Image: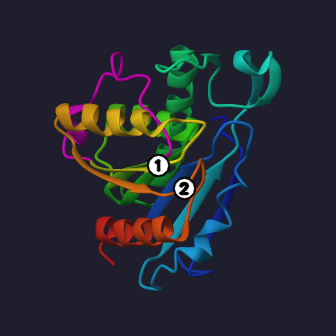
């Protein structure tokens, strides 16, 4: 099986993890982008967690003049609705499914696996989480949107999936309206959602990190 290349860390160090978080970066970045957030989460030592940060493949991105860069899918138009290559997005979600399967093979129950993603990564994890065939612990969408809302085929086993959507009120890259629409669409589909906004741009902030930490602990029973 060919898996996406990843950066991984286990906390506490040298522990045998019984839970996992698969965290996807945004456009033009790589798996190292969010690896540094792990110590900032200040998770308790009672949580034995493996963090998995995949690298996206390098592909041409239309809105960037066809420049080749790490991307989970091509963005065709930067309009309000964000026209994207949904087939590529779906393939990226399937690659995430493979990483979930690998964590299960490593001994982590699917119910103790969280998917997280920033910007493009958030769009992929929503597709991946809703369509996965085993129950997951939750999904975390950061400064993102939901371009496959009309095409995703949800799996009933994750109908109770908790989803946290976070967004910056000053985001010039992905307007906050897209984050609010994603949360509203998810809620209308019957998912258990929570929305948090922060006075920031297309980034993360300390209060958000603290909120994410509390949400992870609530999902994984710390």
Which residue is label 2 attached to?
Answer: 200
150 is within the stretch colored magenta:
yes
Q: Residue at the location (52% across, 80% down)?
A: 42
**Front-most of residues 197 and 109:** 197
**Front-most of residues 161 and 67:** 67
- Which of the image's four quarters has the N terminus? top right
Q: Is residue 34 left or right of residue 18?
A: right
Q: Is residue 165 left or right of residue 117?
A: left
Q: Is residue 215 above or below residue 125?
A: below
37 is within the stretch colored magenta:
no
Q: Mark 1–mark 2 contact, CB under 8 Å?
A: yes
Q: Is residue 97 visible?
A: no
User: Which comes sooner in the sequence, label 1 or label 2?
Assistant: 1
Which residue is label 1 attached to?
Answer: 169
Q: Is residue 47 above or below residue 29?
A: below
Q: Residue at the location (73% across, 46% down)?
A: 30
Q: Is residue 40 above or below residue 98?
A: below
Q: Is residue 22 above or below residue 1?
A: below
- Which of the image's four quarters has the C terminus? bottom left
- Residue 56 position in % (x across, y down): 69, 37
| Callout 1 crowding tier (Cα within 10 Å): few <14, some 14–19, many ≥20 | some
Q: Is residue 117 left or right of residue 183?
A: right
Q: Residue at the location (50% across, 34% down)?
A: 124
């Amino acid at each position: 099986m060919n898996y996406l290349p990843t950066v991984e860390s286990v906390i506490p160090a040298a522990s045998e993890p019984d839970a996992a978080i698969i965290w996807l970066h945004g456009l033009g970045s790589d798996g190292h982008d969010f690896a540094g957030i792990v110590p900032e989460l200040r998770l308790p030592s009672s949580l034995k967690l493996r963090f998995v940060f995949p690298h996206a493949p390098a592909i041409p991105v239309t809105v960037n003049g066809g420049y080749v860069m790490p991307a989970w899918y091509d963005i065709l138009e930067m309009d309000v609705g964000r026209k994207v290559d949904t087939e590529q997005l779906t393939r990226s979600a399937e690659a995430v499914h493979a990483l979930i399967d690998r964590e299960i093979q490593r001994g982590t129950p699917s119910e103790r696996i969280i998917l997280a993603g920033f910007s493009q990564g958030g769009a992929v994890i929503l597709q991946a989480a809703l369509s996965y065939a085993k129950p997951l612990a939750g999904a975390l969408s950061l400064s993102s949107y939901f371009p496959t809302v009309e095409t995703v085929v949800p799996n009933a086993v994750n109908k109770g999936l908790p989803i946290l959507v976070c967004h910056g009120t000053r985001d010039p890259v992905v307007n906050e309206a897209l984050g609010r629409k994603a949360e509203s669409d998810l809620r209308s589909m019957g998912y258990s959602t929570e929305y948090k906004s922060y006075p920031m741009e297309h980034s993360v902030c300390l209060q958000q990190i603290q909120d994410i930490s509390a949400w992870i602990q609530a999902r994984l029973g710390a």
